[in-house]
Amino acid sequence: MDTIKVIIDGKECVGEKGQTILTIAENNGIEIPTLCYIKEVKPYGACGLCVVEVEGIPKLLRSCSAVASDGMVINTQSDRVRQSRKIALELLMSDHTGDCKGPCSLNCPAGTDCQGYVKLISQGKYKEAVELVKDRVPLPASIGRVCPHPCETACRRQMVEEPISIAFLKAFAADKDLKSDNKFIPEIKPATGKTVGIIGGGPAGLTAAYFLATKGHKVTIYDAMPKMGGMLRYGIPQYRLPKEVLDMEIDTIKELGVEMINNVKIGKDITLDDFKSKFYATLVAIGAWKSSSMGVTGEDLNGVYGGIDFLRSVALKKPFSIGEKVAVCGGGNTAMDACRTAVRLGAKEVYVIYRRTRAEMPAEKVEIDEAEEEGVTYKFLCNPVEFIGENGMLKEVKLQKMVLGEPDAGGRRKPVPVDEFETIALDSAIMAIGQKISIDGFEELELTNRGNISADTTTFRTSIDGIFAVGDATNRGASIAIEAIGEAQKASEVIDSFLNGKMVAYKKPFVSEKIVTAEDLRDREKISRAKMPQRSAEERKHDFDEVNLGFTDEMAISEAKRCLECGCHDYHECKLIRYANQYDIHPERFCGDKHNCPKEQKLVTIERDQNKCVLCNLCVRVCDEEVGKGILGLVGRGFTTVIKPEFNKPEVLTFCKDCQKCVNNCPTGALKSL
Amino acid sequence: MDCCCNNSDLSLIMPVLDKYADTKGSLITILQHAQEIYGYLPTDVIYYIADRIGESPAKVMGVATFYSQFRLKPVGKYLIMLCQGTACHVNGSQKIEQAISDELGIADGETSDDGLFTLKNVACLGCCSLSPVMMINGETYGRLTPDKAKEILRTLKEKAKEE
Amino acid sequence: MRIVVGQGSCGIAAGASKVYDAIEALIPNTDSELTFTGCIGMCFLEPIVDIYDGKELIKRLVKVQPTDAEKIIAFINGDKNAVNDIEICDDDKAFLEKQTRIALRHCGLINPEKIDEYIADDGYAALKKVLTTMTPEDVIDEIKLSGLAGRGGAGFPTWFKWNAARQSQGEEKYLICNADEGDPGAFMDRAVIESDPHNLIEGMLIGAYAIGAKEAVVYVRAEYPLAIIRLEKAIEQAKEKGLLGQNILGTDFSCEMRIKAGAGAFVCGEETALIESLQGERGMPRLKPPFPAQSGYWYKPSNINNVETFANVAWIMLNGGSAFSAMGTENSKGTKVFALTGKIKKGGLVEIPMGKTLRDVIFDIGGGIKNDAQFKAVQMGGPSGGCIPAHLLDTVIDYKALGATGAIMGSGGMVVMDESTCMVSMAQFFLDFTTKESCGKCIHCRIGTKRMNEILNRIVKGEGKDGDIELLEELCYSIKDGALCGLGQTAPNPVLTTIKYFRNEYEAHINEKKCPAHSCTELISYTINPELCKGCTLCARKCPVSAITGELKSAHKIDNDKCIKCGACYNNCKFNAITMD
């Protein structure tokens, strides 16, 4: 056999005479992208991704068919080549209609593969489900209980009836795992010898610790409170999240070798400078622990508390007299936690005072309802204007009535005060209107104009090299736990790359998305959402035991089976999306007409979605050239070309050997084995 | 279109197949004859051709749908082929198309309700000096104006009525 | 006397058959002969009737109507002045006199259905010379000497392709003629086949001899039924005379020839797509290499040339390669046939030596612009070519010089545009064409042309966005680079050239939402000047959507929300009171 030598991307490669450039590159470990070439069938030349530049040849060559000759100097990554591939991918994507991922996953700040674990739960594969969740969220039992689940907000099942109970399913699987004898422990990479210090043991700090530890780094978490868990422990009441569950999840993180040091205050016990010298990298995840004030006269009276201060005191089991008449100001989840805690502490009359109406309340609907069941009274369209005391003790609150005016920038109708007042007698008032960061000990770091720590949104770097920051303490301020977890997971990747010598910023991956309307789902059978078994309001309001009793296996499995499986089955194997992310594509530049074919055309055990088809013609060619059947064919010409087995005639199906070769060779998710 | 229950007289195409079925590469020629015989390519004829030449129906369908000459549906009594060549475009073929559309209520590729007319925009007919041009059942009409085009269609309508 | 009616497709479309029939009805009363010929080339004067006395053309009658038959009979019966009113004027005579006809040398002179007329005019003499005195290598050398290049558009040296096919290993070789003339606005090849089919057959046989092919195929587009009929007849006649088939002219050279009708796909003009189509497949281009010379029809060595290329071959063999190369420029030899159409006074077939200028063709031969309007641009090479603006009218006809403008020589389509043509709309027209004709195989062409068409479409509708021109340019360059075949690689040319020469028109559409040519209906608005309006109510009555209101004898108004921009008011106003903006 004659051998030839070629230079590919500066590397000398040896090949055989008559081999194509692509084959020689592949044999020498150089990947050239292609969607339409496989060894088993003749080169076709459709996708144009395999183009390369060869010195002395003015045209780009399709390497799948261009035969190499001795001495060729080939460039597979020149700007011209990359531009050609980029445009090809953008054009392809502009006519590729499909969801890479379900809306649940895309709407999850941590990018959890909800559809994936829901599917595993539906199959009874709980451990696998937990493993998949923990790829993004190391505290699933806790988060599954408390998360306001943006995933469910986005869930398309609600266009049929109600969203999938994704969060509770997560908690269900995680509980199973925690109780099992061989709970899931992630694989840990060999020790790198690099150390990371984390300030703050809340959801963000714990998450970062988990992922950095699995990457082989030595992680130490410092926390000012007596125990780890942050707001999950000191901000979320026991009846929603039993601390025993949290403890177990923290223990798992500890088992990865993460050192956890409590009762350490930065600036007092240890300084930021100490971290700089002690650790290769530091992550600041201190949260926002100061209750915001309303600026109302009398807020300094005894008996007026901040929302999270109140919850923290209860969590710390500090002796606390709340009295009989309690008002909670605010409409968020903290207000709900506060009012329901007040009920449990024995208050007889608990009011929630909110400026707008029930419909505008930011708290979760289920929380609002459950609080009401427990006897909380809502006072809508009013706002405290003065706390009135006697001898420094709160006596009553003066409320001003409001009406709803024009919608504000966010679309919510703005409350407008009217000249009408009401006074309520009170023993305590809890101001649950927001949280702020306490910057003590972190003065060195540059802050945003809101007073939060300024961190780069793609690298999480602060103004000081080697110090990163995530979560409630940064940029836009306090948000939900899963948001902080998402940032921490991304930051752990960045920090890992930083520790490895070359920091790589987080880049939001490109995904294909499509629009689905209720009309598209109208033929789905209606199956109602599993209702979480609960203790009765009468029973639960007297103690701090968990309100929810958890799903049974049967409930969880049938609930999980309701999933519409919006995301593409092929996401992890899809060559198209992999390349799309390698070439920084912006197909929206070319948005225009798209194929709009009826979905789900079945061929024996194969489901076809022509709207995802990239017309690489591999299925047709494999069936024709390799299998010798020719069942599939191209129909039409130009842009409107589609691939189909003609007329869907039943006889056609009998020719099909059901060999699945078409499915296996599809570079994207247009074909699916049923 | 996804119906395969048309009952075409397959004996009509047999002589064509007897002549060409064994000559490789004759598919287009066979389809051209079939269309001449049936006026279009009925599904059962396509299946029959596929069977006789030993190709899969998908392959035959692929060829039949690639070339603009082939039709999978019957056409009207009068097939209006409106030239879309450059010269015709420059000289106002769009206005002619609009006029035909106005007169018959059909767009490109459609057949009028009375089954008389099918409009088909075609690539250059090559009568550029007579542009804009249309060809109806083999007869060329050149130097069209919207009014002239309407007039021609009305004459044909009248003619069809008389028949 | 001999009465000859021009019966090319154009002539027939203009009514030549009716004229022929009318004369035929009267001719038995005379001793004259009635016959027909193919395309005379002066489409703007069709139908044309020539009257010969022996070999001498004594009268050329133009725009002849069936009712003129009696005049013609009167003329041949001796009334010298009977046809004066339909005789061609001197100015129009110049249309042919200024041409140099090689490929078209018999067109309009002989009856294409009579092989004897072809033979009488030196027909098949070249074939005889080649078969009896020249080796295949001699033929290729002679073609090389002539400098003949592919007339289909790309201008690749013919000898090189022939030689490559000749050198290719294998007993079985094919010669193919590409008569799939798909450029909208081009009809040179049709004219050659309809008017002089034997010239094509002779050229092809010489080519087949040169490369060693025993089988030749002519791929004719389906839209040319007359060409197919005449070529079929010609092939039959050539066979009968022993000029086709086994042992041609008694030599040991044998070659069969057949016609394959296309089925309507522009992409089949691309040689590998044409081969696929010949094999009965979808006409989708193959990857190149291998080139057809190595692996073509049925994967055997094949050579494909265009009709006009073959039409020059017999002449070259008879007159010598150097006679051919004596015409033209440094890098473009011989003559080129153009189909001159559009907003031109004298449209038709023009064959001139390379090296003439565009101005020579459009103004000197073509007589300038219809209605003496302003010349704006000429589109060369159809959807694969580009437009050349007024300031480049002195560009010489030469592959290199035309290529330098961004356009191409092309197969010969020359569409003339005046100031009323919107160049953005023109580009959109071509992209619409390529989008419809794209085979759909490669991404760049399938989706790229579609997206370009969409962008252009929104620009002409006044919905263009800032950055659209740059986006178009980016797409253009990428498609040129990435498309699989010539169709896709050249599809951006109309866009690139119009952006290059008429960028201001694009900008006006996008930024000001105006069409400077007043051609894009969505961007036109009509207003009535109250000072000039006499209140005659004509416009209101002509308006198909009742968008115009006003009392008799008082100024009228147009409701622009109702207006469908049909222009009826504008065209009918007798007082120039309506302005178009």
Image (cartoon, coloured by chain):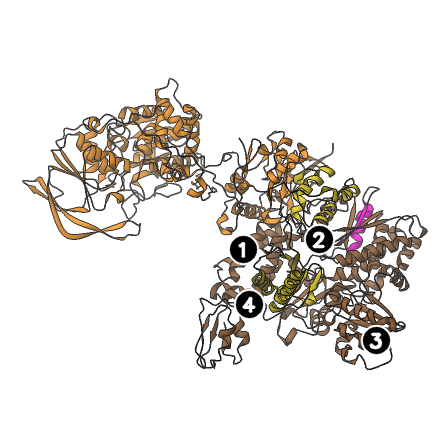
Chain colours: A orange, B yellow, C brown
Q: Closer to us: mark 3 or mark 4?
A: 3
Are dots 4 and 2 in contact, CB under 8 Å? no
- Front position in the image: A38 or A145: A145
Residue C160 is labelled as none
What's the residue at 91%, 55% (across, down)?
Answer: C241
Chain under disc 2: C
Image quarter where the N terminus of chain B lies is: top right
Residue type at mark 1 is Glu
Are dots 2 and 1 in contact, CB under 8 Å? no
Determine whether A654 is above or below C549 in the image. above
Residue situated furthest top in the rendering:
A181
Residue type at mark 4 is Ser
Q: Closer to us: mark 1 or mark 3?
A: 3
| Image quadrant where residue B98 sits | bottom right
Q: CA distance from mark 4 to mark 1?
A: 18 Å
Chain under disc 4: C
Mark closest to the chain's N terminus, 3 or 4? 3
What's the residue at 68%, 58% (across, down)?
Answer: C183
Q: Read off the magenta span.
A: C154-177
Mark closest to the chain's N terminus, 3 or 2? 3
Residue type at mark 3 is Ile
Q: Closer to us: mark 3 or mark 2?
A: 3
| Image quadrant where residue C108 sits | bottom right
Residue type at mark 2 is Gly
Determine whether C396 is above or below C229 in the image. below
- Residue at image mark 4: C519
- Residue at image mark 3: C73
Residue situated furthest left in the rendering:
A391
Q: Secondary structure at mark 1?
A: helix
- Residue at image mark 2: C269
Mark closest to the chain's N terminus, 1 or 3? 3
Residue C454 is labelled as 1
